[in-house]
Amino acid sequence: MTTRYIYGSCLVVLIVVYVVVRLWRLTDSCLWFDEIFSVHAAEHSWTGLWSFVGQDLVHPPLYYLLLKIWISIGSESVLWVRSLTVLFSIAALIPFYFLCRSLQLSRLALLTAMFLLAVNGSVLKYSQEARMYSLLMCLSLFSLWLFSRWMKDAGSIGLVVVVNILLVYTHYFGWLVVLAESLAVAIGQRRKLAPFCLAVVATAASFIPWVVMVVTSFRSASDLDQNIGWMNRPGPLSLLYLFFGIVEPFYYQRVSSDSVSDLRVTIPLIVLFAASLIFWVKAAKSKRSGDSATWILLLAILVPITTVFVLSWMLPYSIWAIRHLLFVIPLAVIVFVIAIDEMSAGSFRTVVITLIILFSSYAFVNTLMRPSATYSWCAWENLLREIPPDDSARQLLTFEDLSAYHIWFYERNRIPALNATRVIGESSLPEDRAYFLPRGFDGVRTMEANDISEGTFWVAFRADDEWNVTKPPVKALILQGYKAITRLNAHCDDADIYLIRLEK
């Protein structure tokens, strides 16, 4: 009774820790570009949302539909918008727990798995972001848990179909989970192949309306270069970074200029991970070496990673991104824990778990000491408020999509609002290809640099802290006869931002 009480208490503590770290610093930063797109999509009507997301091409609409409902219940505040993703992340604990139980993990192993998932940096990052990746992880875990039950004749294939329909409407990579399940049936239980094929057909049939929408949008829109042309094809380093994401506690890359990993923590943990797997593979008499649930787990890890890696080299564009593979992290955590749990030497098992806790604690201390950062896209809102409401210049010119979209978002409900215009043709300013104004969006006008003719206006741009009026983009405007009247700026960690009032 005492052992059960200790186990139950530890489980409750870990669940509390899991929830608390996801609420911790949830509103430290503003909504960034992709999150703004999420809210922007949710602001459309039901039919408008379907069309707007369809034109984006790269993500199905389920998350945006759920976010629309969520916002209608609450608000568009950063806390409320991101709390939906937190809820999805918390809900993922249910299938994760039962998946561990179906593998008959020991109590210590299950607690270790819960701990590793609670502190995982990548899972934590996307638990706090208003995007669909936590929902993808949650539904993938539900799908695999229900599928493993059905494989053992303990569940309904109908539930698997329902979850898989939700899964593929959340993210296209949900089909990789369906593929892994199909291979598991074909390899392990061919007698179930016919009913599962019918389940896949039902899932595919439900997906036809969205396919029609995307195909129609694709024909009328530009190609995928705008969406994913900036993504690099994966190599050995990409796989290494994925392993970092699997084992890294607490730390995550906030922006691309940050270090990919805290190597002081990840290298020792990867060594522990690899050593545990080697011991596990060598254990030919492992109790679970032939367990169907274990093989389902391995397929659900290896099939998506391998498929995405290969397709990223075969297709015109790479589709490799660790956030899209977030759902493999809890599965890899379970495999790691199984390997630890089946070590014949109990003392070695204790040492490994102790080291995991110590390195995770060290990572937590490093996270506490990690200084908070102010990014340029978050600073625009406060800087825009410094422009007097009665200022006669209501036209604002921007020179990159990242700034233009954020400025539009902050100004869209203000009265009077600044009218944002995206100036193209100013090649002297840096442009991040990963950010682009949504297709079918007319909230930001575009114009050629040579067509600027307004008498008075503001210009907004990012630059280094040594910027002055003799540099782009103001230099070209001064040569056209404009004078810089007012200068507002803010220092940020990634770049400084400027608002310059010009008049002729």
Image (tube, rainbow, N blue to C red):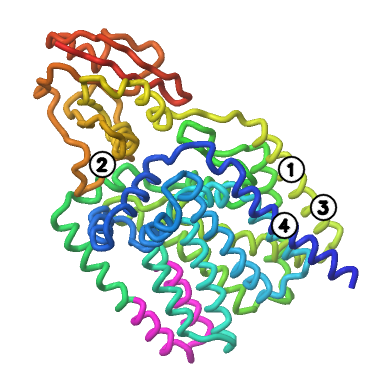
| 261 in relation to 325, above or below | above
- Single out the mark in the foreground, 4 or 3: 4
Query: Helix, strand, or loop for circle 3?
Result: helix
Q: Which residue is disc 4 drawn over?
A: 14
Quick one: label 2 or label 3, which is nearer the N terminus?
3
Q: Which residue is disc 3 drawn over?
A: 351
Magenta-highlighted residues = 175-203
Pick the residue in front: 501 or 53.
501
Q: Which residue is disc 1 drawn over?
A: 361
Mark pair 1, 4: CA separation? 14 Å
Q: Position of residue 302 (x, y in %)?
A: 51, 64
Pick the residue in front: 416 or 467.
416
In reply to whether residue 457 is colored magenta, the answer given is no
Q: Which residue is disc 2 drawn over?
A: 437
Proximity of marks 1 and 4: CB atoms separated by less than 8 Å: no
Amino acid found under the numbered disc labelled 1: Ser
Quick one: label 2 or label 1, which is nearer the N terminus?
1
